[in-house]
Amino acid sequence: MLRGRHFVEPGNFSIAETDGLFDLASKIEEDGNYLRESCRGKVLATLFFEPSTRTRLSFEAAMLRLGGNCLGFAEPGSSSASKGESLADTVRTVACYADIMVMRNPKEGAALLASRYSEVPVVNAGDGGHHHPTQTLTDLLTIKRLRGNLEGLTVGFCGDLKFGRTVHSLAKALARYPGVKLVFISPPELSVPDYIITGVLKRENIPYTETDSLEKVIAGLDVLYMTRVQRERFFNEEDYIRLKDSYILNREKMALARENLIVLHPLPRVNEISREVDADPRAVYFKQAKYGMYVRMALLASLLGVVSC
């Protein structure tokens, strides 16, 4: 039972609970009327202290499709944070108005802090370079629906693996499934953090490799997770310019890959995936965005207790 719980990082839910959300999301996908109006009278607050398009709009679309209402802000200048209000006070206040809140914040650990002060469920929509658990649900659901399972897969992560919270969350989640192998593709400056390698993969004995060449490993992948080099995470503009075009997925690289490969991307895309790849049936990142709405509908309904999964 997920009613009333917070969702701060992927490990908050067991595999069985996560599978329950996937089953619920699949029912929603298959039946457009399933759970319609189930959240009538409920209010979702979206607290976005950092820019977002897909995550914020998919949460709002999810709540509206469930029959509920939304309130909130899309950037910190629209909130009392610009006046110096503490996060704890913001959360306590918003909890007086809403039944559930979704928060994105550039500071790592902000969602965990919010959960300690909120009387309603807090959902982490991204905290700095740390976690993005609802994107992870989206990614896992996409893989499961299009590949049929989450076990025994070789998953490659390419691009900004140092600052990419979607990478950190998904790698941590995949480590719970048997037979998974991970391949990390990045320049040394953007390699996956040690806390993922030591604290997750080595601890759980998950096979992994690190390389700076996408061409050398793409033929062995079941899933390729592309990421953008995030300008907003860099302190030095010169470093960003030097690294931003490190990996560009194009038709030539796709020709080296398996016929049943699927290519994911959390979006937004800049130039790390050539537009010519969009027509390839293995490019599923826009399907992935739609799965994100379904799984967020399932999550909201479950945390609000209108359905049990």
Image: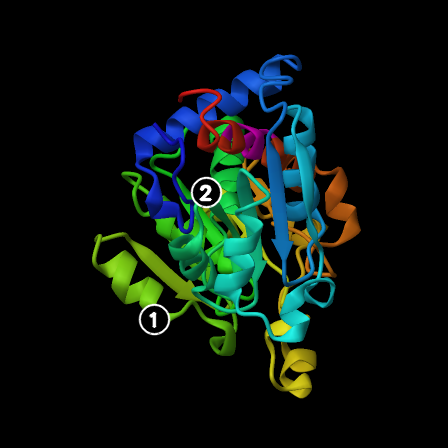
Q: Which numbered marker is on residue 306?
A: none
Residue 24: tell me if it is visible: yes
Quarter of the image for residue 49 reads bottom right
Residue 106 within the magenta-colored segment of the rendering: no
Left or right: 147 in relation to 46: left
Does 287 appear above or below 73?
above
Q: Amino acid at mark 2?
A: Pro
Counting residues from the N terminus, which is met first, the one under dot 1 or under dot 2?
Answer: 2
Mark 1 vs 2: CB contact within 8 A = no
Q: What residue did someone put label 2 on?
A: 121
Left or right: 115 in relation to 230: left
SS type, badge 2: loop
Q: Amino acid at mark 1?
A: Asp
For the N terminus, give its image quadrant: top left
Q: Which marked residue is nearer to the observer: mark 1 or mark 2?
A: 2
- The colour scheme is rainbow
State the residue in front, 44 or 24. 44
Q: Which residues are magenta?
A: 294-298
For label 1, the crowd category at 10 Å Cα-Cα, with few meaning under 14, some 14 to 19 and many 20 or more, is few
Left or right: 23 in relation to 80: left
The location of residue 194, given as percent across then percent down, is 34, 71
For label 2, the crowd category at 10 Å Cα-Cα, with few meaning under 14, some 14 to 19 and many 20 or more, is many
Residue 295 within the magenta-colored segment of the rendering: yes
Residue located 66% across and 81% down the image: 242
Q: What residue did someone put label 1 on?
A: 194
Residue located 32% across and 67% down the image: 195
The location of residue 301, given as percent across then percent down, is 51, 27
SS type, badge 1: helix
Does 159 appear above or below 293?
below
Q: Main secondary structure of the magenta part?
A: helix
